[in-house]
Amino acid sequence: MATSPKIIVDHLSVNYRDVQALRNVNLTVRPGKMVGIFGPNGAGKSTLIKAMLGLMPVVTGRVTYGDDTLAHQLDRVAYVPQRSQIDWTFPATVWDVVMMGRVKKTGWFNRFSASSRQLATAALERVGMLEFRDRPIGALSGGQQQRVFLARALAQEAEIFCFDEPFVGVDQKTETVLFNIFRELAQAGKIVMVINHDLGESITNFDQLILLNKELIAAGPRDWVLTRDNMTRAYGGHVGFFGHVA
Amino acid sequence: MSLELAVLDWFFEPLQFAFMQRSLAVAIMVGIICSVVGSYLMVQRLALLGDAISHSVLPGLAIAFLLGVNIFVGAFIAGVISTVIIGWIHTRSPIKEDAAMGIVFSAFFALGITLITTIQKDNKIDLNHFLFGNILGVTVGDVRDTAIIAALVLMAVFLLYKELLFYSFDPLGAQAGGLPTGLLNAGLMVLIALTVVASMKVVGVILVLSLLIAPGATAYLLVPRLHQVMLLGAAIGVLSSVSGMYLSYYVNLPSGPAIVMVVSALFALSFLFSPRHGVLVGPRRGRPWQKLRTLLPSKGS
């Protein structure tokens, strides 16, 4: 299997209105690893992903994937926004949402192919939501909604997967499904980036961490990033999770 | 005469007049495209934008009339310009989008009224026809223009359906997946402006919002998927326009307001009795009379 290229973030600075949101971030994201993006509220975690994908303007810096800017290769990206960003009363069924993952690959003016429908069906099966395919999305629990979004991302057949706070308000079963599939994706050589803020037990699921607080505090293997000094710099003095810290 | 014949007679009598044929044709087409395009406004919580665009077409219409250009073209351009200015104010300043809409559409509307009032003194043009519609005055040319616009709008929605569905549900996810969301948004604005322009003669710029929002909202309470909302909404839109026209013919009501009152009544029925979301009969809401009692102010509290 040919290995995917890596993402290189080079001197990235981002402003949100007139306030600096991220300052001079340099990092490399490699395929095959589960990468967790951590930091306190307002640390710029979502901003980092959005800026990397070119969804918001950057002040300086460049983000490349292989030979080209990542923002030029968005058809290789599956992005799952925070659940709170979505209007769940929208008139759509589970099936409608998963098929959205096939829109770009299907192309303008074309109808969905049989293979697209197979991919969507397989994706729903994988997240355990196939029996709900005709349900309106508003009739699902938070965890089920998140699994539908994961199925949409799987149906996109992307190389780069970005999840923004996928564990907020989900049940234990969904959390297990999400981590299992993230792991499978990473093992299949994909790039998997997950924004999270829960510093509990689940942090051990990640191979690599990116620790942010308006600038890059540290990035690299989990045990290497999780030092007392790094955590204090990211979260300030009041942190109660030193059980995991090297 | 048997009852059936009486009903048929009642139905066909207005159709012997050419002006009624033309107005019904336009009313049906407008009923369809308003419901389809308006569904996008509703699901994106942009109902106010429909109002903004419809009020903003007036100055373009007046200027086109002065220049001797097709007034549909002028109205369309003004509608599009208003959305561009709204977007510009909203992105380049801390002003929120709804405030930007309020500022822009009232400014355009005021300019339009001023221009039309000034020119209507010397010309055969009536401000009231644009504000409240003048469907009985539609010409063969109007029917043709409306048909062209309706065909364009429906074709665009059909061809771009899957992209517009993704974009209107999850704009960030669509953009991150490589869809040109700026272009899709602009396309949607153009569709709305075209629809508003086609609807001017039927209900006028003030009441067109009702035809844009109410049929889709009525359908939304009854069916769960966007294309179903559009199809059922179109049926509701057509039913409303046609019954509004007949009301107007037989009871001598102004036709635009008659259409709007019918569609509003249909919404009210759906709101109260929809099996999925009805206030009185919706799921897990007990029996209708129990529900009715909970709506009334309770005694002694």
Image (cartoon, coloured by chain):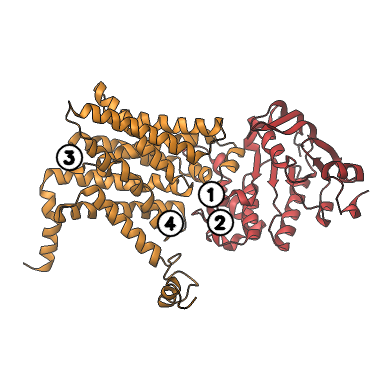
Chain colours: A red, B orange
Q: Nearer the viewer, mark 4 or mark 2?
A: 4
Task: State the CA–CA distance, disc 4 to disc 3.
Answer: 33 Å
**Residue carrying label 2:** A94
**In this orientation, which residue lies closer to the viewer: B234 or A230?**
A230
- For label 1, the SS is helix
Going by the numbered disc 1, the residue's amino acid type is Ala
Give the crowd class for mark 3: few <14, some 14-19, many >=20 residues within 10 Å.
Answer: some
Task: State the CA–CA distance, disc 3 to disc 2.
Answer: 47 Å
Task: State the CA–CA distance, disc 4 to disc 1.
Answer: 29 Å
Q: Which mark is residue B220?
A: 4
Residue A202, visible in the rendered structure = yes
Q: Residue at 29% across / 44% down in the picture?
A: B30
Task: State the CA–CA distance, disc 1 to disc 3.
Answer: 50 Å
Q: Residue B133: which quarter of the image?
A: top left
Q: Chain of mark 4?
A: B
Q: Residue B268: which quarter of the image?
A: bottom left
Query: Residue A209: x percent and y percent?
Result: 82, 43
**Residue carrying label 1:** A114
Going by the numbered disc 3, the residue's amino acid type is Gly
Query: Residue B189: x percent and y percent?
Result: 43, 36
Task: State the CA–CA distance, disc 1 to disc 2.
Answer: 18 Å
Asked if badge 4 and badge 3 are on a common chain, one would say: yes
Asked if badge 4 and badge 1 are on a common chain, one would say: no
**Residue carrying label 3:** B137
Give the crowd class for mark 4: few <14, some 14-19, many >=20 residues within 10 Å.
Answer: many
- For label 4, the SS is helix
Q: Nearer the viewer, mark 1 or mark 3?
A: 3
Q: Residue at 49% across / 33% down in the picture?
A: B87
Query: Residue A51: x percent and y percent?
Result: 68, 34
As displayed, is residue B227 above or below residue B160?
below
Q: Which mark sits nearer the N-terminus, 1 or 2?
A: 2
Q: Residue at 62% across / 57% down in the picture?
A: A145
